[in-house]
Amino acid sequence: MRLHRLEVEAFGPFAGSVEVDFDRLGADGLFLLHGHTGAGKTTVLDAVAFALYGTVSGARKDGKRLLSDHAPAGSVPTVTLEATIAGRHLRLVRSPEFERPKRRGSGTLKENAKATLTWLDGRGENLSRIPDIAEEVGRLMGMSADQFFQVVLLPQGEFAKFLRADNEERGQLLERLFDTTRFGTVEEWFLDRRRTSAHDLDEHQRAIDVLLARVATAAGIEGGADADPATWAHKLEDEARETRDLAADELQKTKSQAKVARDALTEARRVLELQNRRRRAEAELEAHAAGAGRRADLVAELADARRAEPVATVARDADAARAKAAAAARHVEAITDGLRSTVGGADLVAELSWPPTADEREYIRSSIRVWRDEIVRLDGALAESVAADRLAVEVGRLRARQVELAEAGDALSREREQLPLALREVEKALDSAQKARAALPALVDARDRAADAASAAADLRTRRAERDRLERGVLDARQKHQDAREYWLDLLQRRIAGMAAELAGTLEDGVACQVCGSPEHPHPAEPSELSVTKADEDKALAAEQKAAAVLTTATEKLGAVERAIDVLVQRGGDGDADALAQALTAAETAVGEATALGDEIERRSASLTELRDRESYLQERARDVGVDAAIVAERITTSTTQLGEIRARVSEAAGDAPSVEARRARLDALAESASELLDARDAGAGAESAARELVAKSETLAGDAGFDSTADAVAAVRTAARQGEIEAVLTAARDAEVGARSVLDDPEVVAVAEAEPVELASVQHAHDVAAEVVNVAVAAASDAERRLLDLERFVGQLDKAAEAIAPMQTAHEELAALAEVIAGRGQNARKMSLRSYVLAARLEEVAVSASARLGRMSAGRYEFVHSDEAGPRGRRGGLGLDIRDDYTGVVRSAKTLSGGESFLASLSLALGLADVVAAESGGVVLDTMFIDEGFGTLDADTLDSVMGVLDELRDGGRVVGIVSHVDEMRQRIPSRLHVIRGRTGSTVEVVAG
């Protein structure tokens, strides 16, 4: 990377635009960047870093405030850098995020960061997106922003901390510079694999523990396994098998004993049952002999009932026929009474007699036909009556519609008369709203100017009070600075005057004098009460510089406030505050009123359109209402005439009846009653004839069955239930006799007739005891078999699980041991993780490179010693860095170095680290680098050595920029970039040697 030109505007302490020509400045390969404290030397380096990476180094990037306080309001902080990186000539322009005042009103607005990359060699597409630019710069540079800050902008203060840091702090910096992500990934991979392996091993071990518990449960014990779970499980399996065999033998023995008891019980029950059957058969024969008379009576009763059944059936039919004839006669009489009381029916009834004749039947049928014909004619009149009712309803609806149309016509006329006035009012309101919207921009602009002036007036009072306070502070600081400077100059003069006494204080006998060279000192000067030491002078000088810094800070603050006052006056804030506030209130009121009126344009325009549409609608609606009214009037006249004609015809059809419906109903009732009467008379005559025939038949059947009369036959009848009951009693008696005699004739019953009675209880008890013994043996044998089956299954599963876990255990132990070593634990004696090992290797390379430069700078006295020993209390090792002193041969801590020696060591470390990082980044060529501060701690000889090393850095065309305010550096380095501090901001001056 080689820098060509840097341009900075409104950035940091630079209020205006400043430009640095690095090609001219670095023509000799070495230039000095100097200036007073706070002038902006480091800001130049920040501008380079910001142009490349969009950020600055150190704690300054946390402030996020890169806009210059000295810049005029509205200025845009911008950094432009032209450089050649990896052979590509390009220009980078960046602007950071910053706050700017609002153009109208008070307050600020945030401007976002912007950037562009332009290829000056004409190859490639220019870029304007910040992420794309960051990616391209990172690719060309080959290093991150942190690496750039460490190897290009060498910050000596940070390397002094790095030199004295412990292993942990040193490791954190190295991890930022060297990418150890892949090695950390390896460490995490091993940790994840170990956790996964441990989890899998635990899962298998838990499965084995579950199997052991199941084995113990199946064996019926609570204790755990022995040292060898497999042997213990197989032992339990063998014991269960032996227990199973013993239980099976015991079961066979108890079953044999139970069979003997069961056979004895069966025989006892058989004999007892035979004896009981004999006793029951003898009792049944005695009971059968005692009931012989009763059974003879039942046989006679059953014979009479069966002969009387046909007679009773015919008698019941005759009774039913007589009842039916009586009911038919009553029905005929009821219908006759109804017709006799009806107009037109009495004439029909007067012509009838009983029993009915064929002529009477024909007379009734002819009357029915006459009435049915009249009903048909009346149905036509009824249809016209219904049509008349519907037409009357329609006439009423039309008259109501006529009234509605008349009212609607009146309402439309009234609304049409009022509409022109409403149109004129809405048109006037719309014109007012349009004029208010047209005037709104001017009112808003006037309001913004009034608001800005009022805000400026309020800020102006505060700023002027602050200016008065700062002016007093500047006067006080200037007086203190003058006093401190006079005091320092006085001490300086007094020290010069007493320099002889100060030199005399350093003389030693036999040592040559620094002035005359004589080893003898006969009359050394004596110090007086007014003598001043260098420490007194340095203390006074530091006080003077501190007072100067305080004065500069106070002056800069006063200048900033004065510039702010000028800006506020230009914004109109120097007028009367009350008048400005009143003007703002009036402007805001005018804007509010105009805005409100302008917002009404759309609504008022819509209202005007709506009224005009309403006017057209009313005209069309009035025409439609007039046409509808004429049509309704015509339909009312036609319907009224038609309704009168229909009602006249209906009245004629009703005759003397109240209505057509009443007359039709009366005729329909006469026809229905006459038809019913005809059928009832025929049915009544038939029922009387059938009843007479059935009575004669029942008397004949009673005589044939041997009964004196039909009544006697009916009395002998028995119900089917009674007959079944008699038959059941007779059958049961016969069956009981046959059964009892067959039992007594049974050879087995005959065989036990003389036997002793059986005592069943004792035999049953012996059988129950034997059965219980068998049940216990069966349960024991079943439990033993189940335990054995469970143990065989679980022991087999345990053998397979134990066989599977053995290689897993071995692999896990190897993986865990390797993971511990990689993580810096276990057998890792150095306590170095993989990342620490890689960083230790990089630090060793840095130490070798830095030792070469430190040896030349220290005239061969010092070199770095890298240590890979573990830290105290188990901390990680590999990052130890000490100093070997060749004068004493002792390796000691870097913390024991003096201030100048620490600078040499820090500078050597920075240069060595730059070499290693450049090599790590793929051999990036660093054509330009900067070294910041630290040279004030060196004596003349050491500074010569350091400058010699820096001269070597220029080999190959490299440009080295040294940032220092040491005066001697200006004499040694002719090419200089002078940063000049001022009250209105810093400027730069390029002095090319």
Image (tube, rainbow, N blue to C red):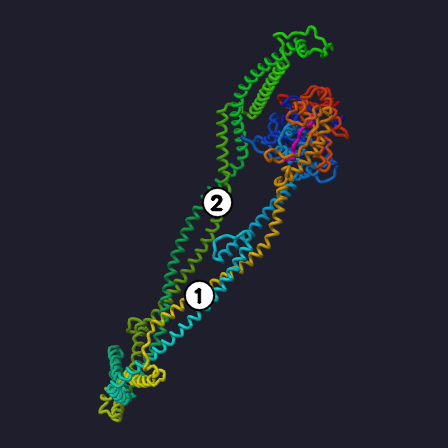
Specify few, some or many for label 1: CA neighbours under 10 Å numbering under 14, 14-19, or 20 or more: many
Badge 2 or badge 1: first in the primary sequence:
2
**Looking at the rendering, in which quadrant would you find the C terminus?**
top right
User: Could you tell me which secondary element the residue under label 2 belongs to?
Assistant: helix
**Looking at the rendering, in which quadrant would you find the N terminus?**
top right
Q: Position of residue 867 (x, y in %)?
A: 67, 33
Find out whether the residues at labels 2 and 1 contact each other: C-beta distance under 8 Å: no
- Residue at (70% x, 6% y) in the render: 522
Q: Is residue 836 magenta?
A: no
Q: Position of residue 513 (x, y in %)?
A: 72, 11
Q: Is residue 884 magenta?
A: yes
Q: Position of residue 187 (x, y in %)?
A: 63, 42
Q: What range is drawn magenta here?
A: 877-885
Q: Which residue is mark 1?
A: 777
- Residue 956: image quadrant is top right
The answer to whether residue 248 is left or right of residue 364 is right
Q: Which residue is mark 2?
A: 607
The answer to whether any part of residue 514 appears in the image is no
The answer to whether any part of residue 648 appears in the image is yes
Q: Which secondary structure dominates the residues rendered in magenta?
A: strand
- Number of callouts: 2
Residue closer to the observer: 909 or 329: 909
- Residue 500 to residue 945: above or below: above
